[in-house]
Amino acid sequence: MKAYRVEEMDGETVLASHAVEAMAPYEAARKALGVEVTLRAGADRWIRVVELTDRPPTRLRPGVFEFRVVGRTSYPLPSVC
């Protein structure tokens, strides 16, 4: 499992941050927030997932991922913490 930091975002403002271990970035977002996620696609309220690793990110293996809750482009994010 990999370590991730999952951040609930409003524009470029971090609303909340969660530490999660998961196999993939989308799974980390799902575990932290308890909702299904999909790619961000320009949503104002969104979820940033940062892979915490010693390896530098590359174009083929980015270290930052952007998601939103499935079916919503703007929403109040559920807060788990």
Image (cartoon, grey):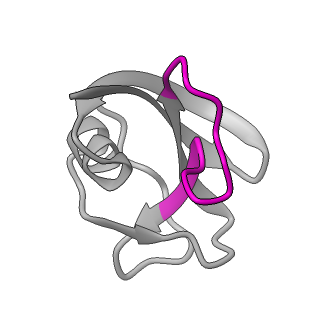
Q: Which residues are magenta?
A: 52-67
At x 47%, y 65%, the residue is 68
Height in image: 71 above or below 39?
A: below
At x 36%, y 36%, the residue is 79
What is the chief secondary structure element of the magenta stretch? loop
Quadrant occupied by the N terminus: top left
- Name the quadrant containing residue 46: bottom right
Along the line of sight, which residue is nearer the eye, 24 or 14?
24
Q: Position of residue 55 (x, y in %)?
A: 56, 26
Q: Position of residue 28 (x, y in %)?
A: 30, 41
**Magenta run includes residue 60:** yes
Q: Position of residue 22 (x, y in %)?
A: 23, 35
- Name the quadrant containing residue 74: bottom right
**Magenta run includes residue 57:** yes
At x 75%, y 38%, the residue is 13
Q: Is residue 47 left or right of residue 33?
A: right
Q: Is residue 2 left or right of residue 56?
A: left
